[in-house]
Image (spheres, coloured by chain):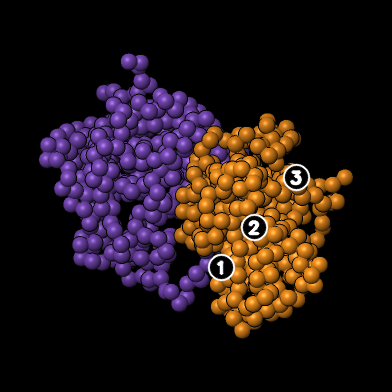
Amino acid sequence: MSVTYIDAIREAQAKLLREDPRVFLYGQDIATFGGAFKATKGLAQEFPNRVFDAPISEDAMLGLAVGTAIEGMRPIIEMQFADFSSIAFNQIVNQAATHYYRTGVPVPLTVRLPSGGTPGSGPFHSQSMESIYAHYPGLIVVTPATVSDAYHMLLDSVALDDPVIYCEHKFLYRWLKAKSINGDHLPIGQARIVRPGKHATVVTYSAMVHEAVRAAERLHEDGWEIEVVDLRSVKPLDMDTVLASVARTGRLLAVGEAFPWGGVTAEVVARTVSEGFHLLDAPPQRLNSRDTPVPYHPKLWAAHRPTPESIGEALRRLLSF
Amino acid sequence: MPELDVQPFTEGAVLNRDYIRAAFRSMLRARLLENKLSSLYKAGKIVGGVYLGRGQEAVSACLGAALIQGKDFFAPLIRDQAGRDAFGEPMIDCTRTYLGSVLGPMRGRDGNIHRGRPSLGMPAMISHLGAQVPLIAGMLFAKRLKGELAGVVGATCIGDGATSTGAFHEGVNLAAMEKLPMVVVVANNGFAYSTPNDRQFACRDLVERARGYGIAGHAVDGTDLLACASVIGNAVARAREGHGPQMVVAQLLRLSGHGEHDDGSYVPDTMKAGHYGRDCIEVAMRQLVEHGFATVDELFAWQDETAEEVQRSVAQAQQEPLPDPYTDDWRALSTRLS
C-alpha cells in the first residue's frame, strides 16, 4: 500500500470534515464528481451537506468563503486550477487579506490552488501563483512538496485563524508516493533541510524540491555535496534556515517554477544578500521558468521550467565562480 | 413583453407606524450628521474623503429599519449612513472613523464609509463595488450550515454602477442558486460617480435583471418614504419568509457629488428639477404629518434632539486619541508564526 500526494489531500479533508463541524468544502465539480483531480472523491457521499458544487464564479466562491469564515465556519475552497483564482483575486487580496488588520476579526479560510505545470496543460492550467499571493500582507502561503506535508499542512492551514493559500502541485498528485503519512511534521513557517551538503545551497519549494534533489544527486557523482532546502511555506519565509544553510555552504541558488520577474526566488536572494552578505562566497543565483506564458507542447514545456539539467548547469556555474 | 415579477407600491398598503417613524428618524440623523461632516471636510478637519447619502436616505433607512441587529446581516455601501443608523450602528462609530479616532471600530486603519463591525452582523465595506454581495451570501450560508438560518435575512444596498461588476452578477446568481434569504437594494441615482445610466447598462430597467437570475424584482420610487417602507419592507419580509433572494431597484437622484470633493456639475439641471430631484426628507416630513405618523411638533423636537446628538458625537470624537505608529502592533495576521 502506498499513499499519493492527492490521497493525502483527500485524507486530510476527510479527517477535517469528520472532526470539525465548522469545516465545509465548496468548489466546482467537487461533490458527486469528486473534483477535476478527484481530491474530494467520495467525500460528498460520506458527508452529505458539507461538500458543495459551486457555480463557475470564483469571485462569489471566495466572497462566500469570507462571509462564512466571519460567521465562524472553516471553509475550504477548491479552485479547479490555481490559474482560475485570478477571478477571485479581489476577494482574496482585498477582502480576506485586509480583514483582520482593518476590523480585528480574523478570517479562517483555506483556498486550495492546484498549481504548477504538467505536460500538455498550456498557459491557463499551469501557473504558479504563490509569489502573487505572498506579496499581500494578511495571507499565509504554503507550498507542500511531500505526501506528509500535503496532509499535515492542510490540517494546519485549516486550524489557523487566518486566510491560507494552499498551493498543491498537480505534477505531484499521482507521481509522488509514500509508504505512509509520516507522523512527525514541522509547523508552518519552518523550512526543512531535504538533503545536507557543504558546497552550495539550493533553496526551493513544491515540485522543484524533487528536481533539485535529482540535480544534487547527479552533482554528487562528481564529488559535489549540494544542500537542498524545502521552504514548505513561502510566507512566512524561514530565513533562519536559509541563512544557516548558506553559512555552511557559502553559495546560494534559489529555484522556483513561477515566472522569473520578482517573486519568491527574488525575495530569497534579496534577503540573503541583505542579511547574509558576509556568508557568501559567490553572487547568489536564481532559476525560474522562462519569462513567457507556459507553453502547451510537452517538448516546449519541459524546456520552459527548471529541470534537473538546468538546475545542475546553474549549480556548476555557481560552483565555478 | 412578459410580465415582470415587480410589485410596485400600492396606495393604501398597511404601514407599520413604528417602522416608519424609526426609518424617518434615521434619515434625519443621517442628514444632520452628514451636513456636519461636510462642514468639517470643508474646514479641513477630516482625514480623507467624505461621501454623503443625500437623496438616498429613504431607501437606505427603510432597509436598515426592516432588519434586526443581532439576527440579520447588513452590508452597507457608500451612501448608507441612514441604513447604518437604522440597523443600530451608534453615531459615534461614524464620527470616530471619519475623524480618525483610535477608539473607533477601524482604529484609524481604515476610514470614512469603510467601517463596520462584522461580529455584529455589519461587515466593513471594501471599495471594490459589488464585493459585498457574495460576502452577505456567505454569512447567510454559514447560518444555514449551523442550522440557524430560519427567519434570518442578509441585505446589501448598492448603486447602479455596482450592477455592472462581475461580483454583483456572480453573487446574485450564487445566492439565487443557493436560495438564500438575501435582499439586494439597488439605489439607482442615475450616475456612478459621473457616468450616467446610458453609459452604464443597456437594459430598459435594472429590475428586469431579477428575472434573469430567477429571483423576485421590485421597483420603487426612492424619493418616497412610504413607498420605500412598503416595497423594501415587503422584500425583506418575503426573504425572511423563505421566498429566496429579492432585488429592489429604487429610482432617485444623488443630491451631492460622488464625494464632497465633487460638485456634481455633470448632473443636468432638468434632472435636478425633475421628479427624482426632490428631497426625500421634505417628502417624508409631509407624508408623516399627512398620514398621522408624526406631528409637526414632534418633527421639530426630533430635529433639535438630533442636532444636539450630532454636536456631542463630533465633540467627543474630536478629543479622542489618534492612532500612534509607535505603539501600533502593525500585524496583518492574528496568528503569530515563528
Furthest residue to the bottom?
A278
**Residue at coordinates 81% horizontally, 67% vertically from top-left?**
A221
State the image quarter where residue B232 is shown. Answer: top left
- Which of discs 2 and 1 lies nearer the camera? The answer is 2
Chain coloured orange in the rendered structure: A
Task: Give me the disc on residue A306.
Answer: 2
Task: Give me the disc on residue A244.
Answer: none
Q: Residues within 10 Å of mark 3 (few under 14, many from 20)?
A: few
State the image quarter where residue A317 is shown. Answer: bottom right
For the residues labelled 2 and 1, the Cα–Cα distance comes to: 18 Å
Residue tagged 1: A267
**Where does the C terminus of chain B fall, quadrant-wise?**
bottom right
- Image coords of residue A178 (percent x, y): 82, 51
Task: Please tell me which residue lies in front, A130 or A197.
Answer: A197
SS under mark 2:
loop
Whether residue B152 is visible to the viewer of this picture, yes or no, is: no
**Where does the N terminus of chain B fall, quadrant-wise?**
top left
Same subunit, labels 2 and 1: the answer reads yes
Mark closer to the chain start, 3 or 1: 3
Q: How crowded is mark 2: few (under 14 residues within 10 Å), some or many (20 or more)?
A: many
Residue tagged 3: A174
